[in-house]
Image (cartoon, rainbow, N blue to C red):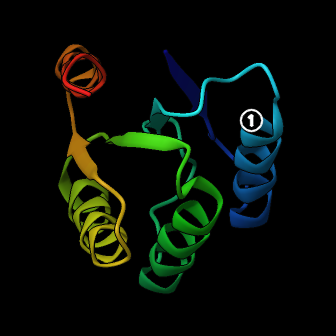
Amino acid sequence: MRAAFRFARKSAIRRVQTLSALLADPGLQLCFGILIDARGASSRFALGEAQVMAESHCRLSKGRVRRTALLTTGGVQYGVGRMVQAHAEYLGLEMEVFTDETRALAWLEEGLAGG
């Protein structure tokens, strides 16, 4: 199973609230993949926001999310996404950054099939 949410024009607090609501759903399997689609974000992530996003995502996802795919537009957004990825992996969450939705979904499916 995979879940996806888009956070165009959502603040960092609203993104954490959205993820919290998703993970509180008792109908979700114990481990699943999640696609975070940041392509519609109205502004670039700030470095501090990237760290907060990674820490919040890891805290909320531990034990429930097998893999997280972060979908970006490329350029600066991709670079900051890689910083989020590095911080998330340091905290123990498997995350990858993509600019292609098909590849992101394939990576999520591969991880779910393998475990």
> Where is residue 41 shown, x and y percent of the image?
54, 46
How many tags in the picture? Answer: 1
The percent coordinates of residue 51 (x first, y second) are: 46, 80
Where, quadrant-wise, is the C terminus in this rendering? top left
Q: Residue furthest bottom?
A: 48
Judged from the image, the secondary structure of the residue bearing numbered disc 1 is helix
Whether residue 58 sits left or right of residue 87 in the image: it is: right
For disc 1, the marked residue is 22
Amino acid type assigned to the residue bearing label 1 in the image: Leu
Q: Nearer the viewer, residue 10 or 109?
A: 109
- Above or below residue 62? Residue 80 is below
Mark 1 closeness class: few <14, some 14–19, many ≥20 residues within 10 Å: some
Up-down relation of residue 85 to residue 36 (above or below): below
The residue positioned 31% from the left and 22% from the top of the image is 112
| Relative to 67, residue 58 above or below | below
Horizontal and vertical percent for residue 71?
34, 37
